[in-house]
Amino acid sequence: MSATFGRVAVLGLGLIGGSLMHAVRQSGLDVVGYDIDPATAAAASASGYPVTPTDAAAVHGADLVVLAMPLPQVPDALRSLAPHLAPGALLTDVGTLKQPVHAAVREIVPHARFVGGHPLAGTEESGWGATDPLLFRDAPWTLTIEPETDLDAWLAVADLVCDLGAKPVPATAAEQDTAVAHVIGLPHVLAEVLALTGLAGGPLGLSLAAGSYRSGSRVARTRPDLVATWCDGNAALVQALDDVIGRLSGAREQLAANGSMYELAAAGHDARVNWEHRRFAPVELRAGVEELCDHGRNGGWITAVLRDDDGVRLLGMRPPS
Amino acid sequence: MSATFGRVAVLGLGLIGGSLMHAVRQSGLDVVGYDIDPATAAAASASGYPVTPTDAAAVHGADLVVLAMPLPQVPDALRSLAPHLAPGALLTDVGTLKQPVHAAVREIVPHARFVGGHPLAGTEESGWGATDPLLFRDAPWTLTIEPETDLDAWLAVADLVCDLGAKPVPATAAEQDTAVAHVIGLPHVLAEVLALTGLAGGPLGLSLAAGSYRSGSRVARTRPDLVATWCDGNAALVQALDDVIGRLSGAREQLAANGSMYELAAAGHDARVNWEHRRFAPVELRAGVEELCDHGRNGGWITAVLRDDDGVRLLGMRPPS
C-alpha cells in the first residue's frame, strides 16, 4: 500500500531516523538519508545506505520527507529544506512533542502537507550504532490529526506506519503532548530524580542498589539533551509533576505518622497490572477527522488502510467500550 | 566451608525462602522447610524438598534457622520457634528492614545468636512458583554487624552467603535501613506513584505508554503488602521522600518558568552511569567488627572467609579509595 511513496528522505540518522531507514527499505521503498553530522552520515553510508551530502539533495525528488533530527534543530532544517521540497511532497517528523513542530511548520513552511508523527519506540541508547530495523514493530506511533489536516496525507502516512509494523494512533497535537507528559516526560523526570536521590544512600547504598533502583533509573541513561527536548515547554508536564508531588507528599505524611504504604502500593499495583492486561477488540472506521480523533482518544489505533472502489476503509483496534 | 552447618531450616517458602532452599541444597547442605500456608508447603514438598508440618519440627536439630516469612509474621514466628531452637543454633533472616527484626529478636529471643540478613535479590514476582536456585548469584546480601555481634556467628553466615554465590555486605542495622530507604523504599514508592499518575494521561496515554513507563513502573507489580513491609516504619524513607519532593518541586518551577530539564537530566545521567561503571579492587580484611563496618560503609563486600592455623582472614572487594 505504501507504494504511495516513490522515495522517502530521512533527515537525521540517529536511533529513530536510522532505524527508520532500515525499516523503510525493508518495506520495499526507495530511501535516502542525510545527517548534519559527517560521522553519522559516514556510518550510515558504510552500512550501504545512500546518504546525500546536503539536505537539499536528499529532499530533491522525495515524496515523503521525514524530519528525524532533535527538536531544537527542526526550525533550521525546515528553513534549509523548504526551497527544495517537491510539489505535493508530504512532510512528517518523529519528535516526542508535537505542538512545537506544528508551530514551526506553520511558521516556516505554512503550505507544506504536514502530518506530525511520534513513534513510541526509543530506548535509552542513541546513535546509528543503536539502530534496529525492528525498532518500530508493534510500537504505538502518534499521527497528529487536526480539523485542518489533509486527510489523504494522513492516510498515506498511516499506511506506511502500518507497513512498518507499528500502530498509528490518531490524536491532536495538544492531546498527544498531554498524554506524553504523563507517560514519557514524567517517567524520565522521575528516573533522573531517583538516580540522584537514590545515590544519597552513600557507598553502602550504591552497593545495595539492585533491581528496583536499576529499572527505576534505567532511562536516566538517555542523552540529557534528548530528555530536555521531550520535557521542556510541555505545560502538561507541570500539571503531571504537581500531581506526583501531591501524591508523594501524602505518602511522606503517612509514613511520618507511622502509617502504611499499603494503600498507595495497592493502587499502584492495580494501575500497573490493569495497564498490562488491557484488552482490545477490532473495529472498522470511516476515514474522518472526528471519528479518528475519537478513536485515538479512546485508546485505539489503526491496523490497516484499505482502498477499494467505494473509497477508503480503516481497520483498527480499540479497548472494548 | 559452610559445612559449618549440619542442617539449615528455612521458615517461609516464598520467593526468597524457597530460592534459598534450592540454593542451600545445591551448596551441599541438608535443608528442611516450613511454611504456614499449606498450599506453599505442598508445592515445596512436591518439588522434592523435606517440608515439616510444624515450625518446631523444622527448627528441631537445625543449627541455622532462617526466618523467611514477611516481616509482620516475624514476632509470632519467633515466639513459636523459641522453645525449639537447638542450643548454639544461629538465627538469621532475609527481611528488607533490619531494625524491626533486631528489635523483635531482642525482645522475644534475647539470648539467640542472631545475625540479620537481607539478600538484595527479589524480583516483582513472588511465591514458590517464582523461586530460582540462582536468585542470589552476585546479589549483595546485608549481614548486620553491631558492637555486640557474635563475630563467629557472623563469619559462619557470611561463609554460607559466599557459598551461595552472593556478596555479604557488613553494615549496622541502622545504616542498612537508611541505605535501603534510598535504593529500595524510594524506587518502590516512585514506581507506585508513576503507575498511578502516568495513567492520568487517559486511554490515549495508556496506549502511548511505552518503555519508560514500563520500566519506571515495573516494581509496582510487586505484592502491595510486601512493598508496605519494605517501607513502613523506616524513618530514613521520610527523609528520602523529602529530598525527592524538593528536587521535583525544583524541576516543576524550572519547567513552569520555561526553563529546561537539561541540568537535572545531565546530573541524573551521570549518577546513573557512574553507578553502572563503579570499579572495585580486591582487599584482605581482619575479622573485626569495626573493620567490617567500615568496609561495608565504604561500599565493600566479602568474597571469602578463610580459616587457617592463624585464625580467620577475609577477602573482599571495595571501591578504590
Image: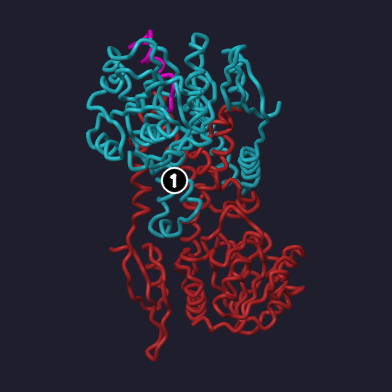
Chain colours: A cyan, B red
| Residue at left offset 59%, top offset 12% | A311
In reply to whether residue A110 is colored magenta, the answer given is yes
- Where residue B127 appears, x then y in whole percent? 66, 59
Q: Chain of mark 1?
A: A
| Stretch in magenta | A96-111
* Residue B102 visible in the shown view: no
| Residue at left offset 40%, top offset 77% | B288
In reply to whether residue B127 is colored magenta, the answer given is no
- Where residue B304 appears, x then y in whole percent? 42, 76
Query: Please, which residue is most extreme toward the front here?
Result: A309
**Amino acid of disc 1:** Arg
Q: Nearer the viewer, residue A116 or B11?
A: A116
Q: Would you say B25 lies left or right of B236 here? A: right
Chief secondary structure of the magenta portion: helix
Residue with the mark numbered 1: A218
| Residue at left offset 50%, top offset 54% | A211
- Where residue A316 appears, x then y in whole percent? 62, 25
* Residue A80 visible in the shown view: yes
- Where residue A306 appears, x then y in whole percent? 58, 20
Whether B92 is drawn above or below B2: the answer is above
Q: Quadrant of residue B109?
A: bottom right
| Residue at left offset 62%, top offset 71% | B21
